Amino acid sequence: MGMPAPHTEWTALLARALPDDGKRYEVLDGELFVTPAPSLLHQRALTALLEIVAPYVRQHALGETFLAPADIEFSPRRMLQPDLFVVPLSPRGRAREWADVRSLLLAVEALSPSTARADRHNKRIIYQGEGVPEYWIIDLDARLAERWRPGDERPEILIESLVWSPHASVAPLEIDLVGFFGSILDEGL
């Protein structure tokens, strides 16, 4: 449940050899993290966010938007499954396999009690170290988004709106966080 499994050094190859049992396996700097299936609210939030982000990404030809599960392997010791992520366009065309994905334009994790520490610490360090331009942590309980960028020592805490500007040549995407969280948590419906 979000805790490192006992083993000295895990790799993506070892994690892929584990049984397909409905759990998510990630390798965070050589440690195996196992998480159970996400909650309904977690999935509702990610679906709603996908419905906002994916059309924007398509409209501006930024890349492709995906939901977990997906094995994003930055190195043999770093294989993550971001809840939602954007793979940038590549001069070689669209990726055919997860192994073809070597960078992300955006990574998003929705917090759950079993993943909060890994999302805020281990994964953040990896996303920042791999140069992912934006990493968002969606906290349903606190009704806020944390935005991390490479080099940040603290997150930007957003409670009213989240503005994403992936390229200067493209109009930014603005997400009304108050409305977003209200719709996920059935407030005002």
Image: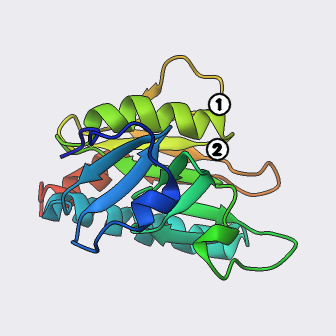
Instruction: Name the disc covering residue 150, or none.
Output: 1
The Cα–Cα distance between marks 2 and 1, rounded to whole angstroms, is: 7 Å
Q: Residue at x 80, y 69 (%)?
A: 90
Q: Residue at x 43, y 66 (%)?
A: 16
Q: Residues within 10 Å of mark 2 (few under 14, many from 20)?
A: some
Q: Kindly identify the amino acid type of the residue bearing the numbered disc 2.
A: Val
In the picture, measured across the screen, residue 143 lies left or right of residue 16, that is: left
In this orientation, does residue 168 appear?
A: yes
185 vs 77, nearest the viewer: 77
In the picture, measured across the screen, residue 116 lies left or right of residue 186, that is: right
Residue at far top of view: 153
Q: Say above or below: 60 vs 149.
A: below
Residue at far bottom of view: 96
Label 1: state its secondary structure. loop
Compare marks 2 and 1 and give the one earlier in the sequence: 2
Q: Residue at x 12, y 54 (%)?
A: 187
The percent position of residue 125, horizontal first and vertical second, equals 52, 30
The percent position of residue 51, horizontal first and vertical second, equals 42, 72
Q: Residues within 10 Å of mark 1 (few under 14, many from 20)?
A: some
In the picture, measured across the screen, residue 116 lies left or right of residue 9, that is: left
Res 121 quadrant in image: top left
Q: Say above or below: 19 vs 42.
A: below
Q: Kindly identify the amino acid type of the residue bearing the numbered disc 1.
A: Pro
Pointer 2: what residue? Answer: 132
State how many labels appear.
Answer: 2
In this orientation, does residue 84 appear?
A: no
